[in-house]
Image (cartoon, grey):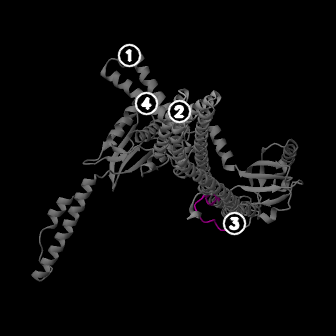
Amino acid sequence: MFNRLKLSHRILILVVVPMIFELLLVARVGQLLKESELEGKREAHSHAITSQINEILRNLLTSAGGMGAYVVSTEHKYLDRSDTDSHRFMTDFDSLENLVKDDPALLARVIKMRAVAEEGVVVLARIKKIVKEDNRIMAFAEMRKVSPMLSTLTAQADDITKEQKEIEARGSQNQEEHREQVHQLLMLGAVLNVLLALVVAMVFNRGFTRRLRVLMDNSYRFAIGMPLNDELKGTDELVKLDQVFHKMAHVVEESARKERAVIENSVDVICSLDADEKFSKVSPASLTVWGFEPWELVGKRFSEVVFPDERDATRKAIKDLIKDGEDRQVECRVVKKDGSLIDVLWSMHWSEQEHSLFCVAHDVTEQRRVDRLKQEFVAMVSHDLRTPLASIKGTLSMISEGVYDPNSEMGKKRIVDAEISIDRLVNLIGDVLDIEKLEAGQMSVDEDIVSLSQVVEQSVEAVRGVAEQNKITIETTVAEDLDDDVLGDNDRLVQVMVNLLSNAIKFSPEESLVKIEIMADGAMNEVRVTDKGRGIPPNNTDIIFERFKQSQSSDGKRGKGTGLGLAICKAIVEAHKGIIGVDSKEGDGSSFWIKIPRYEDPEDLRTNAEAKALEEGQSAKVSNAADIKGGPDSSVPLDEPISQRTS
């Protein structure tokens, strides 16, 4: 149970339990001291009562004695003493009553004593008067009455005094006992403190220090790569810390494993060179990239794999890197084992501590080729950009020349077409700038039910201005009873058709015809754009759909193309789970086509499935009926109605 507690709770218990014992001990000592104080007060109170009674008796006896002497000698000094003492003991009775006011029984006894004393005072006053009348015989007779009163008072006083002395004795005894108990408790507390300190130390050592040593040992094992101790059991903070440490060690080990895997499986060559520029370690990628086994390169100078014409410049760059102590990238050509050359970009880091040069050699041959193609692309004026602009320009020119009235229906329609072309242009520019999406397969498609006829109509309107400028006629044919709905992105499909139509217009001679056909092809809908251009050589029909590729380097009788248009079309069509292709004969025009899966309404699919099941059931019934009638010549004319119903 204790081991399941959190460390903070354990420490709290180890602190609180001794504290509780200490508080109980202090409380008991305080109680005994308070009781001893009360006993002292009772003892002092009893002593005060006894003293007051003794004072009363003394004054009473002195007063009676003085009166007796006065009767005998008639000297006034004895009378004065008697009067003074009488007055004192009456005052003493007031003090005594005040002392015993909280004890009703004792107060009653004191009042009774006072009554006797007051009676005696009356007798003494009478004796005083008799003496003054010079009747000494009567005075002696009255004096004899004083003696019984004194005896009674003395007896009563003795009883009270005896009781008070017993109280004093008990108080002294109780105080002694309390002092002894306090002494014993203090000794017991000291012993318990020592024992609790030992217990706390043992528990703390067993529950904390021992496990802390395990954590310290784990840190040492982790540092030298040894397996860690088993995880601690429990739920406290040390256990959680140990669990986190194990997880951290596992993560670090996994990271190291992945790091080794990255190095071993990296497509780039990762290596290190010593101060003499010799390979000290080489990753396995050297075999696939350069054709050399790692062991073939270890010990070989770095310059031996560099193209001879670039060795001096590369070695100088390495020396400058080591001298400056800065990371640097060096590009050179590397001679592969088969003698071929590749462009390599070296990322280098000099470690003064390791006295080694760490390198990552990245093959940039393809990148450099693409860079060269991109440079050509930058030098071109993209027909994918020029076509919408030309269409917009044509529309604006016709409006400015008065061919179209901006306020007429046709003029407004041409302006709307121009706006649509601008939107297409903006979208196309975005696709060109984000061309890397093609390679990553991230071309976005917002799926909806789209009519290919409407797509073609929008596309034709988008290029109509260019077509009219080039005196090209566009003709659209839609197969009868065609369900031309597909699931796709209307804007993307329009982008494809605009590109295909733009190419057809671009490569068609003036006053020629561009045909658009929409038809079914099995489960797909096909759109085919046919022109009367010069056609495409057979060896180029596959590469024209790649990036930066054209049928001929000088393609475009009205300007150069980017080599991106058809690549974008291919990506869009494939994003629609479709295919794109071209049928062409050089010198006899081209026919570009796309095929997109036809949209099937789920309700229609369910109805077709039910009809098919019904047809299969009816066929089974026909077969059974034929068997019953005795031969294959028997038939039931059900096929035709079923066929008509399912078609």
| Coordinates of residue 317 in the picture (x, y in percent) | 84, 44
Task: State the SS at label 2.
Answer: helix
Tag 3: amino acid: Leu
Tell me which secondary structure the magenta stretch mostly adopts.
Answer: loop
Disc 1: CA contacts within 10 A as few (<14), some (14-19) or many (>=20):
few
Three-letter amino acid code at the position of disc 2: Ile
Q: Pointer 4: what residue?
A: 421
Q: Mark 1 = which residue?
A: 402
Alpha-carbon distance for marks 2 and 1?
163 Å
Q: CA distance from mark 1 to mark 4?
A: 21 Å
The quarter of the displayed image where residue 564 is located: top right
Earlier sequence position, callout 1 versus callout 3? 3
Q: Which residue is label 2 attached to?
A: 127
354 horizontally vs 612: left or right: right
User: Is the residue marked by circle 2 packed among few (<14), some (14-19), or many (20+) residues within 10 Å?
Assistant: many
* Measured Cα–Cα span from mark 3 to mark 2: 114 Å
Closest to the observer, 565 or 556 = 565
Q: Nearer the viewer, mark 1 or mark 3?
A: 3
Q: Which residues are magenta?
A: 228-241
Type of amino acid at the residue the image marks with label 1: Gly
What residue is shown at x 86% (from left), y 55% (from top)?
A: 274
Say above or below: 567 vs 257.
Answer: above
Q: Does the image show residue 8?
A: no
SS category of the residue bearing label 4? helix
- Which amino acid is tagged 4? Ser
Residue lying furthest right: 276
Q: Disc 3 designates what residue?
A: 228
Looking at the image, residue 290 lies above or below residue 430: below
